[in-house]
């Protein structure tokens, strides 16, 4: 995936906040490292990128696999992260098998807009099947339901109301494991709600920042 399928959410959030969309190694046509980095490695790279642009007290938003990076960065860098948003988080601990996840992805894609599917497919092609397969192994083995319990910053678990990949029971279970977790839903949308409903998605994030994050920020 790349920043392209987050561009509508980025644009909405950027109307009243500083927003950065960051592509990580091996994605969006960027060079692949000599070895295959795991979730903690990717999160460290994300933290270094945010350091480079001078960000502090960030609310980190990650979608799907990116939700794992956002959670892990929140654990690694509480000095940098003031809140984490796991949007359509993977992978459901009750449905973690690769074939199950592939079937759910196909089921979702069948009802997503064709233009959006085109972006997704071209992003898969740019990173290459071998690279994506190696990253998918890390994604499937990452115990996000255990890792959120180590967060010391607020967590929002956000989903499209019709998302077959991140079901309601799963996001509620995930939020309950966090010390300060909340759930929000964008009704009527699927796994890619950040693209199909950017204003509603941004609204849920703003509400989370206003109610959960802002009170904890330094003056």
Image: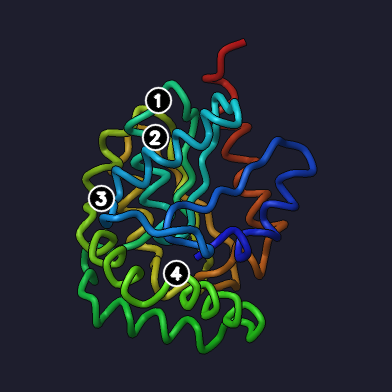
Mark identifier at residue 78: 1
Asked whether 17 or 36 is in front, the reply is 36
Mark earlier in primary sequence (1, 3): 1
Q: Is the residue under label 1 in contact with that under label 2 (CB below 8 Å)?
A: yes
**Residue that numbered label 2 is attached to:** 74
Mark earlier in primary sequence (4, 2): 2
Q: Is the residue under label 3 in contact with that under label 1 (CB below 8 Å)?
A: no
Does residue 116 appear left or right of residue 93 in this picture?
A: right
Does residue 18 appear left or right of residue 157 in this picture?
A: right
Q: Residues within 10 Å of mark 1 (few under 14, many from 20)?
A: some
Mark identifier at residue 145: 3
Q: Could you say where residue 173 lies in the image, as x and y percent from the top left?
A: 30, 53
Q: Residues within 10 Å of mark 3 (few under 14, many from 20)?
A: many
Q: Is residue 103 above or below residue 162?
A: below
Q: Residues within 10 Å of mark 4 (few under 14, many from 20)?
A: many
Q: Is residue 114 above or below residue 8?
A: below
Q: Is residue 214 above or below residue 182?
A: above
Q: Give how far apart the Cα atoms at labels 3 and 4 are.
A: 27 Å
């Amino acid at each position: 995936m790349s920043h392209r399928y987050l561009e509508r959410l980025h644009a909405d959030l950027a109307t009243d906040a500083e927003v950065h969309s960051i592509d990580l190694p091996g994605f969006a046509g960027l060079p692949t490292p000599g070895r295959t980095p795991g979730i903690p490695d990717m999160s460290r790279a994300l933290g270094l990128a945010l350091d480079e642009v001078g960000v502090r007290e960030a609310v980190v938003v990650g979608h799907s696999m990116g939700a794992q990076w956002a959670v892990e960065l929140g654990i690694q860098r509480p000095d940098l992260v003031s809140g984490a948003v796991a949007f359509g988080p993977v992978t459901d601990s009750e449905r973690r098998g690769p074939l199950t996840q592939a079937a759910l992805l196909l089921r979702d894609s069948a009802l997503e807009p064709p233009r959006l599917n085109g972006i997704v497919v071209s992003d898969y092609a740019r990173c290459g099947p071998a690279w994506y397969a190696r990253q998918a192994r890390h994604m499937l083995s990452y115990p996000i339901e255990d890792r959120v319990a180590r967060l010391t910053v607020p967590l929002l678990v956000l989903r499209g109301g019709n998302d077959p990949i991140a079901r309601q029971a799963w996001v509620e279970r995930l939020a309950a494991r966090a010390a300060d977790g909340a759930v929000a839903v964008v009704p009527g949308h699927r796994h890619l709600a950040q693209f199909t409903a950017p204003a509603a998605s941004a609204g849920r994030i703003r509400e989370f920042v206003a109610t959960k994050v802002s009170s904890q920020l330094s003056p």
